[in-house]
Amino acid sequence: VRFLVLHGPNLNLLGSREPDVYGTTTLAEIDEMLANAAAPHEIVSFQSNHEGELIDKLQLSGPSVNGVVLNPGGFTHTSVALRDAVQAAPVPVVEVHLSNIYAREAFRQHSLVSGVCAGVVSGFGAQSYLLGLQAVIALAEAS
Amino acid sequence: VRFLVLHGPNLNLLGSREPDVYGTTTLAEIDEMLANAAAPHEIVSFQSNHEGELIDKLQLSGPSVNGVVLNPGGFTHTSVALRDAVQAAPVPVVEVHLSNIYAREAFRQHSLVSGVCAGVVSGFGAQSYLLGLQAVIALAEAS
Amino acid sequence: VRFLVLHGPNLNLLGSREPDVYGTTTLAEIDEMLANAAAPHEIVSFQSNHEGELIDKLQLSGPSVNGVVLNPGGFTHTSVALRDAVQAAPVPVVEVHLSNIYAREAFRQHSLVSGVCAGVVSGFGAQSYLLGLQAVIALAEAS
Amino acid sequence: VRFLVLHGPNLNLLGSREPDVYGTTTLAEIDEMLANAAAPHEIVSFQSNHEGELIDKLQLSGPSVNGVVLNPGGFTHTSVALRDAVQAAPVPVVEVHLSNIYAREAFRQHSLVSGVCAGVVSGFGAQSYLLGLQAVIALAEAS
Amino acid sequence: VRFLVLHGPNLNLLGSREPDVYGTTTLAEIDEMLANAAAPHEIVSFQSNHEGELIDKLQLSGPSVNGVVLNPGGFTHTSVALRDAVQAAPVPVVEVHLSNIYAREAFRQHSLVSGVCAGVVSGFGAQSYLLGLQAVIALAEAS
Amino acid sequence: VRFLVLHGPNLNLLGSREPDVYGTTTLAEIDEMLANAAAPHEIVSFQSNHEGELIDKLQLSGPSVNGVVLNPGGFTHTSVALRDAVQAAPVPVVEVHLSNIYAREAFRQHSLVSGVCAGVVSGFGAQSYLLGLQAVIALAEAS
Amino acid sequence: VRFLVLHGPNLNLLGSREPDVYGTTTLAEIDEMLANAAAPHEIVSFQSNHEGELIDKLQLSGPSVNGVVLNPGGFTHTSVALRDAVQAAPVPVVEVHLSNIYAREAFRQHSLVSGVCAGVVSGFGAQSYLLGLQAVIALAEAS
Amino acid sequence: VRFLVLHGPNLNLLGSREPDVYGTTTLAEIDEMLANAAAPHEIVSFQSNHEGELIDKLQLSGPSVNGVVLNPGGFTHTSVALRDAVQAAPVPVVEVHLSNIYAREAFRQHSLVSGVCAGVVSGFGAQSYLLGLQAVIALAEAS
Amino acid sequence: VRFLVLHGPNLNLLGSREPDVYGTTTLAEIDEMLANAAAPHEIVSFQSNHEGELIDKLQLSGPSVNGVVLNPGGFTHTSVALRDAVQAAPVPVVEVHLSNIYAREAFRQHSLVSGVCAGVVSGFGAQSYLLGLQAVIALAEAS
Amino acid sequence: VRFLVLHGPNLNLLGSREPDVYGTTTLAEIDEMLANAAAPHEIVSFQSNHEGELIDKLQLSGPSVNGVVLNPGGFTHTSVALRDAVQAAPVPVVEVHLSNIYAREAFRQHSLVSGVCAGVVSGFGAQSYLLGLQAVIALAEAS
Amino acid sequence: VRFLVLHGPNLNLLGSREPDVYGTTTLAEIDEMLANAAAPHEIVSFQSNHEGELIDKLQLSGPSVNGVVLNPGGFTHTSVALRDAVQAAPVPVVEVHLSNIYAREAFRQHSLVSGVCAGVVSGFGAQSYLLGLQAVIALAEAS
Amino acid sequence: VRFLVLHGPNLNLLGSREPDVYGTTTLAEIDEMLANAAAPHEIVSFQSNHEGELIDKLQLSGPSVNGVVLNPGGFTHTSVALRDAVQAAPVPVVEVHLSNIYAREAFRQHSLVSGVCAGVVSGFGAQSYLLGLQAVIALAEAS
C-alpha cells in the first residue's frame, strides 16, 4: 500500500520562508516524518511550483497509489484545473495546510479545492501532514 | 492532564439524524472513542443546543482543562459570541466537523469561529474528533 | 394525533408589542384558537426566547407529535442551528409568520429556515397560524 | 361575493410538467377544488403565459371581484410591472406557490411581488391555493 | 427611578480577557462605578452569555425600570431576536461598547441592534458605560 | 412631423392609482396636453400592459414618426428586450417618468433602458411628458 | 421529423438593426438557410416580440416537433418564465445567439435560460443557427 | 421672482473640454440662454470647483431665490454633504446633466443627490438646463 | 487646557433644518452649552461646509489644543482625506452625531472616519456633543 | 489549410473521468473524428495540463495554422494569461466545451476566455468539437 | 518647459505624520529634490487640503505647464471631480503615491483617478515623485 | 551587483501583439535598454508563459541577484502562488506594467501581487521597466 504526498508551490522553501507563519521544519524533514509515520505503508513525495505537474501527478495516482495527501499551497484559492484533477482521482485525496488559512488574508479563506477533497486539516504546522496521512490511510482501509 | 470536548447543537442526534451526511456512530460512542484514545489523559464531554451553555463551558476551560476540541455545529456560521469565547480561552481550541463543510451549502462554507481556533479538521466523520484530539494534545504538550 | 406549536422570541409580547405590525391578539388567544381549530387533534404550545430551548423541543417532536407549526421569530434570519433541528425532525414542520416578512426590512427577507420546512405561511396575522395548522394536519394525514 | 384566481406562466402544464416538483393535479382540478371550497362564493379562474394579460386581469379586479389569489409563476422573480398592478389593486391579493420556492434555485428565492401582497402561502402543492383562498376570503370579510 | 444595565456574552471575563482591547477594569468595578454615578437613581446589573436571558430581562424592563444601558457584546452583530426585544422595550435603550467597534474586524462593524436603540456610545472603555448611563438618564427624564 | 408617445404598464390607471405618487391627472388628460403642446406637430399615443406590444410599436416608429416619448413604467427596470428595441429605433427616444424614480425603492433606481435613450426626464408629474416632448422635438429638428 | 425554430424579440429587424453587431442577413434568409440545411427534415419558424407567445409555442412543441432551436434574444437575461417553459419541454432545446454574448455588456453575460437548454452556440452570426440545428437534429436522433 | 443656477466642478471648461461628450456651447452662452428663457424672472448663476462653495450658495438660496437648477457635476456621485444641503433647501431644486449619465461609466450611474431633488433632466446638452429651468419655474409657481 | 469643536457641513443650519431629525437647538446654543460644560477648560468652535477647511483646522489642532470633538456631518461617509487628517492628529479625536446614524439611510451607516477616532457618540441630539466633550476631556487627562 | 485543436487540463482523462458528465468517448476518438470531419484540411491536436504549454502553442498558431478550436477546461474560469494569448492570436479561435458549463457550479459559469474568442459552443459532448471545427473553418474561409 | 507638481491633502504634514508609512522627508525637501532633478526644466509646486483648489490648479495647467505630477492623497479614492479635471487636462498627468497603496486598507486600493492618468508610480517614498517626474518629462518630450 | 528582470506570459510577443496597447518595442529591445541603463550593474532577463517557471526563478533570486523587476502579465490578477513567491523573496521586487492597468478591463484592475511588492510602476510602456529598474537599484542600495 502506497500513498502520494503532493506539495504545492513555494513549499520547497519551507524552513526559511516566513518561519513565523510556516515554521522551521524543512520539507525534507516533513517527508521523513511522513515516511516514518506511514510505515509499513510506503510514501512517495513530490513538490512542484507548476500547477500542471501537480495535475499530472494526481492523474497518475490511481493505478499506483491508494490515497493522496495534498497541500495545494497558493493553488488552493485559484485553480479549477487542480480541483478537476482531484475530483477525477480514483483514490481519496485529503487537503492539508500548515497554517490556519481561515485566520489569514480574505483571499486565502476561500478554497476551490476543498469541496472535492475527502476532508481538510489546517493550522497545525507539520502535524497537519501527519493528521492528513492518518486520515487518508483510514479512508483507504475503509474503501 | 484533561481535555474538554464540546459538542454543539443537534449533535446529540448523532446516529439517527441524516446518517448519509453524519454517519451512524452515536455521540456516546464518539465520547468513548475519545476517552480511549486520550488515555492516560482525561476527557470531559459536554453537548448542548444552547449557545450560552457552550460559552459558559468554554469560559471555565482555563483553570480545569488543558485544551478543547470544539464542534460548534450550526453556531460555526452565526456566532460572534462563541468566537469571542474561543478567543478568550487560555488554552488551545481545535475546531472539528464530521462532514466536509466546504462541500455543502454556501452558508456553511464561512466560519466565524475558525479564525480564532488553533486549527480545523473537517470531513472525516467520527475520525475528525480523533484527529482533533491528537492535535490539541500535541498543542498542549508543546505549550 | 398531536401537534406542537412553537413560538419564537418576543412572541410572548403579542398583543402589546407594536400592535400595528403584529395585531392585538395575545399569544394565549392564538393558542386557544389553535386548540379549537385542531380538535379532535391535540395542540401542545411552547414559547421561548431561547434558541436552545426551541431546538430542544423540536428534537423531542418525533416520538410525541405528528407535526410542528413553527414561528421562528427573529431566529428565522440568523439560526443555522434551528435550521438543522428542523431538517432533522422526523415530522413535517410548517413555518408561519404573523407579518408579511417580505414587506419589511431587508434583513428579514432572507430566511435560513424556510428551505427545510415543508412550506411557509406569512402575513395573515393570527390566521397564519390557523392556515399553518391546517397545512401540517394535511401533511401528517398524507404521510 | 366573487374571487379571482390568477395562474401565471406554465401553470397550464400542471399535472404533466415535472410532477415531482409540482404534483400530478391538473389546473382544471385545482380550479374545481377552489370552486367547491369557495361556495357559496364564486370563483373566476384565468391562466396566461402573458405578463400583460395577467396585469390586464388584475386591473379589472376592482369593480368585479372581492379579492385575488395569485400564483405569479416565473413572473414572481422578474416583473416590476406585475408588482405595480398588485399594488394598484383595490382588493387584497394573496400570493401562492405550489412548491416551496425558498427551497429551490437562488433566483427563485427573491420575489418582486410578495412585498405588496397581503401575504404568501408557499410549498403545499394544490393546498397552497386552498389556504390562499381561505386567507383572501377572510381578508375580504374583514374589510 | 431605576435603570437596568445589561452586559452581553463574555463580558464577565472583563479584566482578564484581552486587556489590550478591553482594559483591566472588571465587570464588578464597572457596576460599582455605575451605581455611584447613578445615585440617587438605582442600578440593576445583569450579565449573561445566553441571548435568551438578555431578551427575557429586556422584556421585563418596562414595568420595573426607566431605561436600559445595553452592551450586547457579540450579539450586536448577529441577533435579530435581541433587536426585536429592544424595539419592543417601552423604555429607552442605549447601546454601549468598550472598544471602538468601527476600528475592528469587518464583521464587527455592522450592528443589527443600533438601528432601534436611542443612540450608541463606542470606544471609551469603562467610560462608555458612564456616558451611556448619563444619556439614558437624560432620555428618561425628558420622556 | 409626427411623434409617438408610448405609455407602459399600469399607466392606464393614472388618476386613480396611488395619487400621492402619480398625481390625479388621467392618461387621457396627459395625451390631450401633449397634443396641444405639440401643435402643429401631430401626436400618436399608445398605452399597453404588454411588453411585446410596446416593442412592436417602437419597431414601427421609424417610417411613421420623427421621435418617441417613452414612459416604460415597470419595464424600465426589467426589460432587455425593450432596451434592444429602443437601441434599434431609427429616431430619437426620450425616457420620461412621472415620479422621481431615484427617490423610490432600490429596484426602481436602476434602469435597463436609460442607457440607450437620448435622455431622461424624471420626477415632474405630467410635466415630465411635456418636457420630454420638447426635448424630442428639438432632437428631431436638429437631426 | 420536424424542428421548431423560435426567434425572440427584435430578431424580425435582422439585416437592418445594428448590422455591425448582427450582420446583414435577414430573418427570412436565415429561415430559408435552415430549411435547406434541415432537409429532408421540416422546419417551422416563428418570431415574436411577446414573451408569452414564445412560451405558448414552446409548450406546443412536444407533440408536434422533435426539437427546438431557440434564440431568446433579450429574454435570455430576464425571463424565468421562458426558462420554465424550456425546462418543461419534452424535446431538446438548443440556445443560439448571433453575436458572442460573452463579449458584450455585463447584463448580457448572464443567461437565465442556458442552464436548462441542452447546449448553447453563440457568436457565429447566421451560422449559429445552422450549428444549433445540427446539434438538435443529432440530439433528436440520439434520443 | 429669481432662480439660482448652480454649476458644479469643471463646468467652467464647457466648450473646450471633451466637446464630443459635453458639446461646444460655453457656460457663458448657457447662462445667457437661461437668462433669456427665464424672463421676466431673474437668473443668478454661479460656478465653482469647490463643494463647500456650492453648499454655501445652496444654503443662501432660501431667502433670496424661488428655486434652484443644479448641475452637481462630479459631486453627483460622491457628495453626501451636497445632498444634505439640497435636502435642507426651502425651495425646489432640479438636477440637470448635459450628458446622459446613465449611458456612461458605472460610477456615474449612481447619484447621491437625485433622491432629494424634485426631479432630474439628463442627456440633452445645453437644453437640459432649459428644461430644468422650466420645471423649477413650474414648481415655484405651484407652491 | 483647550478643546477644539469642529462642526461639519450644513450644521450651521441647525435649529431650522429638518428639526424632527436634528432638533431645534441652534449651533450657537450648542457651542454655549459646550463652553459652560467645559469650564474651566476652554472651547474653540469652528463650522465649515468646506472639507479642506476642516482638514486645515485639524492639522493645527496639535500645538494649540488638547483634544477634538468632531461632527463630520456628510463627510463622515465620503472623506478619506478627513480620515487621514484625524489619523495624523496628535491629540485624541472623538466623533459625535446628533442623530443615530445607524438608524438612517444605508449610505449613512458606513463611516470612513470612525475607525481612526478614539470613539463615537451618536443619536442623543445636542447631548451627543456634551458626552463627546466629557470623553475627550477624560482622554486628554489620561494621556 | 491546417487547424489546431487544443485540449486543456484533465481532458486526457476523457472516457474514464466522470462519464455521466463528460461521456465515454476518449480524446483519441475525438481527435480522429475531427481529422475525418476536417478533411481535406489538416488537424493538429495537442493536450496539456500546463497553462503555459497551451499559451506556447497558441502563440505559434499564427504562422502555421488557419484557426484554433480551444477547449480551455478548468482554465476557462481562471486564466487571464490564456485570454491574453487568445486575444493576441492572428487567427480565429473558437471555444468549445463538452458539458453545458452554464448548467454547472457557479464558478464554472463565468468565462475569462469567451469574450475574446470568435464564439462559443457548449454542451453537446464530442459534437461540440465538431460544431466548433465547422465554425472555425467557415471563419477561416471568410477571412 | 515647466512642470506642475500637485500635492493633495495632508501631504503638508510630511515628515511628521506617521513616519513609518510616509517617511521623514518633508514636502519642502521633496520639492527641492524635484527642482534639482528637473533642471533645466522648471518646477511649480502646490499643496492643498482643498479638492477645489487642486481642480482649479489642474484647469490652469494647460497654458502654463507641459505636464503634471499629481499625488491626489486621500482624494484618490473619492473624487470624481478631480478625475474629471485630470481627464480635461491638455497635458499628461502622472499619478504618484509615497506608500504602496495596494498594500494598505481595502478602501485605498481602488482609485477613481488612475484610469485617466497617463500612468501610476506607487510605493517608493520620495522617489515615487522623482520617477513620476521622469515619466512626465518623457511624455512631454514625446508629444 | 546583479538584477533579475522577469517577463510574464505573452510578453515574448511584444512589438507585434496589439501595438496600440503595448507599443512596438520588442522584448529584446527592452532587455537591451535595461542592460544599458543598469550599467555597471548586470541584468539577467527571463521570459516565460509558465507560472511555475517564474516562481522557480523568483525562488532562485536570493543568492544570485540583488533585486527583481517583475512584469507578471496576466498572472498579476490570478496567481496567489506567484504572490507567495514574491513575499518569500529575500530581495526587493518591483512590479511593472507596460499599459496602465487601472484604465483597462475591470478584471485587470485588481492585483494579487502588488500588495507584497515594494512598489508598482504602470502605464509608461517600455519606460515602466526603466523606472522600475531605477527603483529596485535604489532599494538594493538602501538595504
Image (cartoon, coloured by chain):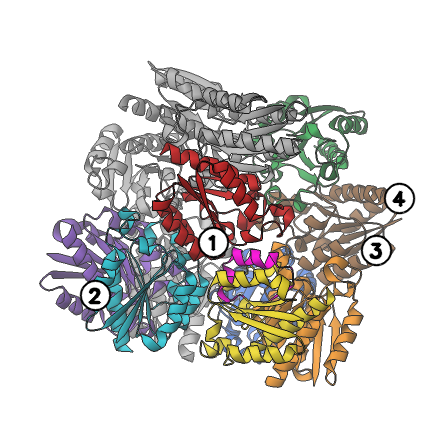
Chain colours: A brown, B green, D red, F cyan, G yellow, H purple, J orange, L blue
Q: CA distance from mark 2 to mark 3?
A: 76 Å
- Amino acid type shown at disc 1: Thr
Q: Are marks 3 and 1 in contact (CB under 8 Å)?
A: no
The part of the chain drawn in magenta is G72-94
Q: Are marks 3 and 4 in contact (CB under 8 Å)?
A: no
Nearer the viewer's eye, disc 2 or disc 4?
Answer: 2
Residue D15 inside the magenta-drawn segment: no
Circle 3 sits in a helix, a strand or a loop, which is it? helix
Furthest-front residue in this view: D40
Q: Name the residue beneath numbered marker 2.
A: H130
Residue G86 x/y as whole percent: 59, 59
- Amino acid type shown at disc 3: Gly
Q: Name the residue beneath numbered marker 4.
A: A39
Above or below residue A65? Residue H104 is below
Could you say which disc has been placed on residue A62 in the image? 3
Furthest-left residue in this view: H40
Above or below residue H63? Residue F30 is below
Are discs 3 and 1 located on one and the same chain? no
Are discs 3 and 4 located on one and the same chain? yes
Nearer the viewer's eye, disc 1 or disc 2?
Answer: 1
The foreground one among J125 and G71 is G71
Q: CA distance from mark 1 to mark 4?
A: 61 Å
Mark 1: few/some/many CA within 10 Å (<14, 14-19, 20+): many
Could you say which disc has been placed on residue D78 in the image? 1
Above or below residue L66? Residue B33 is above
Quadrant housing the C terminus of chain B: top right
Q: CA distance from mark 3 to mark 1?
A: 48 Å
Circle 4 marks a residue in which chain? A
The foreground one among G29 and H97 is G29
